[in-house]
Amino acid sequence: MLKAIFHSVMKRIDAQEQWPASLDQSIEPRIMKKMEKRIEKASFWEANRAGGAYYSVTHGSDASIVTLTERSCSCKSWELSNLPYSHAIVVMREERLNPMTFVHDCYSTKSPTRIL
């Protein structure tokens, strides 16, 4: 009984490791879902150049400062998760940049240090 459970678990682990590699994407599928949600949220925000590399991003009374060159946002979400948040995605849209290029390499399916 214990051997059967062990073999079942080992097959699941192997399938999980091979599944992202079988996709034709360079970013993990769960990260793609997160990014799609963040891109959708970004449609409600408005970006204005604040001078230099800084942008002021607003939605109603909420505001954030985004710097693409430093990959930072005043909400600190980008620095904590290594994924651009909707504030930064608005700026990327304004600059006509692809948000997926700003996703950290640790979320890549081809990265040896990827996060599962």
Image (tube, grey):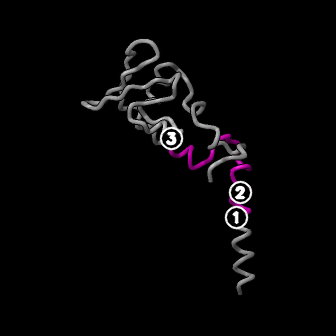
Precedes in sequence: disc 1 or disc 3: 1
Q: Quarter holding the C terminus?
A: bottom right
Badge 1 marks a residue whose secondary structure is helix
Disc 1 target residue:
13
Question: Is 48 covered by the magenta stretch?
Answer: no
Whole-percent x, y for residue 52 in the image: 44, 12
Amino acid tagged 3: Glu
Badge 3 marks a residue whose secondary structure is helix
Disc 2 target residue:
17
The majority secondary structure of the magenta stretch comes to helix
Q: Residue furthest top?
A: 51
Q: Are marks 1 and 3 in contact (CB under 8 Å)?
A: no
Left or right of 112, for residue 95: left
- Decide: few, some or many residues near mark 3? Use Cα within 10 Å; few <14, some 14-19, many ≥20: some
Q: Are marks 2 and 1 in contact (CB under 8 Å)?
A: yes
- How many angstroms separate mark 1 from mark 3 (CA)? 26 Å
Question: Is 19 covered by the magenta stretch?
Answer: yes
- How many angstroms separate mark 2 from mark 1 (CA)? 6 Å
Amino acid tagged 1: Ile
Amino acid tagged 2: Glu
Q: Residue at x 56, y 43 (%)?
A: 32
Q: Residue at x 40, y 12 (%)?
A: 51
Whole-percent x, y for residue 48 in the image: 37, 18
Badge 2 marks a residue whose secondary structure is helix
Left or right of 116, for residue 94: left
Disc 3 target residue:
36
- The magenta region covers 13-35
Whole-percent x, y for residue 62 in the image: 28, 32
Precedes in sequence: disc 3 or disc 2: 2
Q: Mark 3 or 2, which is nearer the eye? A: 2
Q: Residue at x 50, y 40 (%)?
A: 36
Q: Residue furthest bottom?
A: 1
